[in-house]
Each structure stands twice: as structure tokens, then as C-alpha cells.
Amino acid sequence: MSAAPAPFQLVGAAVERVGRTALEEWRASALYRKMLRTQTPATLAVQPRALRQGDAARGQEILDGTIRLAAQTLELEPDETPWGRPSPSRRFARRLHQFVWLRHLAAVGTPEAAYTARLLWDGWVETFGDGNIFSWAPETAGPRLINWLAAAPLIFEDSDPVVRSARLAVLAGQAEHVARSAGEADSGRPRLRARAAAALAAVCLDWPAARTQRLLAALGREADQQILSDGGHVSRSPEAALDTLLDLSIVEDALAQRGEEPPQQLAKVIARLVPAIRFFQHGDGGLAAFNGGGEGDPATIEAALARDEAQSRVFSAAPASVFLRAEAGQSLLIFDGGGCPPGEHTPEAHAGALSFEFSVGPQRLIVNCGWSANQPAGWRAPVRATAAHSTLIVEETSSARLPRGRLARRLLGGRFASGAQSLESRLRAEDQGRWMEAAHDGYRRAFGLVHRRRLYLASDGQDLRGEDLLFRPSGSKDPQPEGGVSFALRFHLYPGLRVSVSRDETSALIAPPHGPGWRLRTDRGPLRLERSAYLAAGAPPRRSEQLVIYGAAKAGAGPDDEANRIRWALQRAE
């Protein structure tokens, strides 16, 4: 799953790395820290409403001395803080310094939880309050500031006025730092979150109106750039769109508490996001798992959508994000008709072109493996590959590839060096059902082939049919491998489903714990049952299975060649 990156990608990444190093040195200087000294507020003008739901069980674990982050743990002695201890990994350390765990202590809601929260907060200030390159990076400082403000009663309402004033002084200094450095954060979600933190702090700390409006305007511009016209995030991740809605909503709520409306640009972005979240919702309340996103927390999703009192109509196509949706009876089909997002937005992206998810009521049947930030790091690369998605893969080669070579990977991080581009995506509605069709070019460079997929969902929701085609475009001058190429058509199944394959290996019965069974049939074979894993619901990875149709295709076949056409159907079993 690797490819040689273009020279301009490496040059751009190298320049970005040099600039980042210079900024880090500047932020670590005594002069920069002196610039952060600002007036200490007597109190917070606004205490924003926390939308991200905490887990009281996770909070109790922290009270018992166990911090679990990024699928790793750190054990602490009574009244010990983690700040003097080495973290199990960089991923663990980043989430630790972002204070993502603070909402879990808030969910416990006891005096002991408040004491522990302040103990850990004071320990961070003592160890890192004067500056630290890692901890003060805007990608870390921005989320930390939002989490501090969302848990303000836990930290900043001390009965001792001297202690309260000292804590508010630290808060004001961190807010000043984030306001100055937000534009330097990594592109994509990290930068948007840092700008949201700066705007939120300006509202909560009652900064001068002119500066607050500038920070809100900067947030609006950033959000407008990242949120597409259909409400999807430019990374093509449903969960990234949800996270953006949560960050913008907490700013909107803080403004509402002051009797103010958000700037028009910001309000329009929020209005685009709400129906997009509903577009990606399955019947169980969670999100479909595409492009590095997971299910999300249904309670948090409902809190984010609560502002939509009119219950926005769910549309059938997201043309800018290139997703299609069909709902019939109790069945729901969500189809990824696109390719890779822009390069700077691919560090979390997946090579899942033309994958789909299918659910019946609250029961998910066909899924992608997905991802969650709490999963073990060793799973990250495997689930980004095409093989971890319910789509077709040629020669076990992903439709998007990571850069080749140690230097290139270090400079580009997790960005793809090359990836599939959408060639077409369309939806047609008929009385009998919905037709979807899309194609991508992710296999042209290596194999000279285009993958086209057609899906049909009957109007009663009990018959889903698919047709996958590999073909060489007319007049193509792309390389053509000699002989044929192998393919695998994968259907990843949600955990807990029971599956049995027929003796002739052309069909399989899928039985959910509740409700009717479904039968998968194909005109090709063999159809095999293999192991899989599901990561979209959070750690740990859940064991699951996948049905796989194996076969071989002609490398030079045209769009009308039946040899490269695979037909299948997923129908409700009698």
C-alpha cells in the first residue's frame, strides 16, 4: 500500500516542517511567554454547555488511579499526577495533555471527582504552565482550552478567591496563546478546533468586542473552507463533520447565553452541518464509518442535533462530499461514490472508494471496519487499506497508497501519496426502487482498470442488488498487465451476526440476533467466510467476519465484457 510521492509534495512538506520548527522555538522563548500576560478576569462571563458526553465509569477509573487513553493505560498512586511520568506513547500523551479525560470526571459529579480534577489540573500547571513545545502545540492547546472551558465549574469555582484568581490567570494566558497560534495548527480539523477554542475563550472571558468579532470571523472563514456545500467535511469523514458541529455549537451556545447571534457565515455553516449528520446516521443513532470516522456516541450526536427542532429532511445525495443514500422500508444504504480528499486532508483518510454500509432498522449488517481514536495504534494502517472496506480490491492493492520510503513518510506523515478519484456518481429514483452508480480510477496507474459499481435497493427495502465491473477505458494508454488480475469483493459484517455459507460457495445466510435473516448470492465464486474486525464502535477491536467473493478479471477487458462483471444480491430470507 505504497507509492512514490510527487516531488512537490515532499518540497512542500519539508518547507512546512522548517516553518513549524521555527514557530515552536519562538513559542518556547521568554519573550513570547511575556506577551501572553493579560488581565485576569474576576470570573467567567459565560460557562459553556458541554455537548461531548462524559462516561462516569471512565471517571471512576481515574479516581481509582487508572487513566485509559488511546487503548493504553497509566497507573497512578493516590494523589499522584501523570505529569512527571513517561506516557506509554505519543498518542496517549497528546490526549492526556488535551484533557479529553476531564469530562469523564465531570460525569462522576462527586466532591472526590472535583478534587481529583483540580489536583491533576494544578499538576499540569506546575509542570508545563511555563511552556513546553509538545504540550503547547496549537493542535494540543486548542482542544485543551475547550475542555477546560466545558468543565469550568469543576476547575474554576474554588471557594478560595486567591486560588480561583490564580487558576483564571492561567486560563487567560492559555487563551491568549491559542488565539495567537491557532492559525499555525495543522491544516484540517486541528486548525478549525484551535480557532473554535480561541473564539470560545474570547466570548467566555469577555474580551473586547472588536477582538472577539475578529476571532469569530476567523473561525467562520475556516469552517466555511472545510465544510462543503452539502455539509460534509472536506476530509469526507462523517465523524469529522460531527466533531466540527460540536465545536461550533459550543461557541454558538456561549454567544446565546450572552444574548448574541453568531456571525452569519458561522450560522450558515452550522445550518449545513445538521442535515449532513442526519444523512450519515444509521437506525441505531450512530454514524456510518467512512474515511477514518467511527460510529460516534449516539447520546452526543443527539445533543448536537437537538437544536434542529424542525427535524431537517434527510436528503438522498451529498454531491460535494460524493455520498449517496437510499432508504426503503426499514432498510438504509449509504454509498461512498467518491475518492480521496485533498492531500492535506488525508492523514486520517481511508482507501475505501465505492464502499457501502447497509442496515435494517437498528441492526447494522454490512459495514466498513472503521476507526476510533481509542483503538490501538497497530490497527491504524490495516484499517486504512481498501481490504478493510466493503468494496472490491484488485491484487490486494489499495486504491489509495501511502508514500514510499522512510523520508517521504516522515515528511508527509499519514498523507496518501496517490489515491482514487471519483469519475462519476449518480442516483436515479424509480417506482420500483433506487439506483446508484459510481466509478473510480484508483487502479488505472497500476493495472489500467477502472472500477464501476451499480447498486439497486428495491422500494420495499428487502432486495439489495449490486454489480461490480472492472474495465479498461476505451483508447487508454495506461499499462496493461499480461494475463489476468485477481480481485476480492469484500462484505464486512457487523459483530454478532451468524453466517453460514452454502456447499456450492455461491450464497450465504446472514442471521442477526433479532429480526429476519438475509441471504447473499453471487453469480461468481467462490464465496468464502473469513475473519474480520470492527473498530468503529470504540476500543477494544471487536471480532467479526466478512464474506469475500474471489475471482480473476481480464486486464484488457472493455466495459461490455461480461468476464469482468460480478453480480450479487442481498435479499431478505423467507
Image (spheres, rainbow, N blue to C red):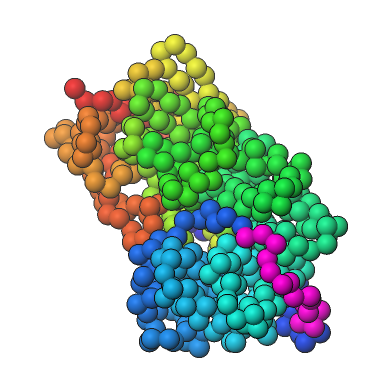
Residue 51 visible in the picture: yes
Q: Which residue lies furthest to the top in this view?
A: 431
Q: Is residue 175 above or below residue 535?
A: below
Q: Magenta includes 43?
A: yes
Residue 309 is situated, as x and y percent measured from the top left of the image, at: 56, 34
| Image height of 27 relative to 208, above or below | below
Give residue 149's position: percent from left, percent from top. 61, 65
Residue drawn at x 59%, y 87% as measured from the top left: 127
Q: What stretch is highlighted in magenta?
A: 32-47
Left or right, 417 with respect to 495, comes to right
Q: Which residue is painted at 68% across and 48% down in the image?
A: 256
Q: Which residue is more in the foreground, 528 or 477?
A: 528
Specify whether residue 18 is painted magenta.
no
Q: Which residue lies furthest to the right in this view?
A: 210
Residue 479 in sight: no
Q: Locate residue 408: give its quadrant.
A: bottom right
Q: Is the magenta stretch mostly helix, strand or loop?
A: loop
| Front in this rendered view, residue 459 or 415 | 459
**Quadrant where the C terminus is found in the figure:** top left
